[in-house]
Amino acid sequence: MRVILGATNEQLGVMKLPDALRKAQSLGLNLVEVAPNAVPPVCRIVDFGKYRYELSKQDKEKKNAAGKLKEIKFRVNIDDHDYLTKVRRAEGFLDKGYKLKIHLQFRGREMAHQELGMALMQRVKGDLTTMAHVEMEPKLVGKSIGMTLSPLPVAKRKRRFLPLEDHEQDAEDEDDKDTGED
């Protein structure tokens, strides 16, 4: 039986299985079958413990990528500057690949003007169309409106608002620690 043999980023060529095993033993490493369905099968000479560790690390990264979710909270009567700051922050999260949950909270008599809340959510949706697509449309649940956005592929993303400067970002982080908002 013949196998394609490779060792740490270099291909050693096609060789017989006993020769490949002998070479792996001489290096003090293991012969690991990477692609058994290929013709001929593909094997690598690696340290098996290290190989298993790298595979488990890749699995963890895949699981973490799906769970990246950030939340930004808005209020109905938000000022323009605060709105722009939050939208810039949202663009930053989307640029890093996070999913984004936009949350608008009504308090007291604000519930009488739900159309203002929906208009604000539509404005956010419109401002972030170059960075994300809507996964869940704005929906009223109790005293709040929720919407979920997913980032566009990296090639299709285009920022509309300038990113926050470093000193502005630091100030925003300090404000978030005080109020508990994202």
Image (spheres, rainbow, N blue to C red):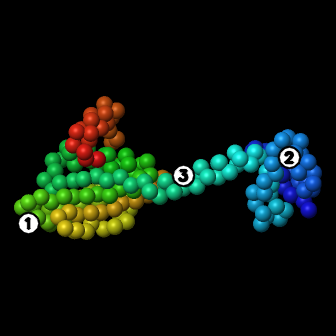
Mark on residue 37?
none
Q: Position of residue 125 (x, y in %)?
A: 29, 60
Q: Give the class, few, some or many, for how many residues have Cα within 10 Å of label 3's Cα (few <14, many ≥20).
A: few
In the foreground, 127 or 1: 1
Residue under circle 3?
61
Which is more foreground, mark 1 or mark 2? 2
Quarter containing the N terminus = bottom right
**Label 3 is placed on what type of residue?**
Glu
Q: Is residue 149 left or right of residue 76?
A: right
Marks 3,1: beta carbons within 8 A: no
Q: Nearer the viewer, residue 123 or 98?
A: 98
Identify the residue position indicated by label 2 in the image.
24
Secondary structure of the residue carrying tag 3 is helix
Of the residues shown, which amino acid type is indicated by label 1?
A: Ala
Distance between the Cα atoms at labels 1 and 2?
A: 74 Å
Q: Residue at x 21, y 53 (%)?
A: 74
Q: Which residue is mark 1?
A: 112
As shown in the figure, which amino acid type bears the numbered disc 2? Ala
Furthest toward the left, the residue is 109
- Please name whichever residue, 97 or 131, is drawn nearer the observer in this view of the structure: 97
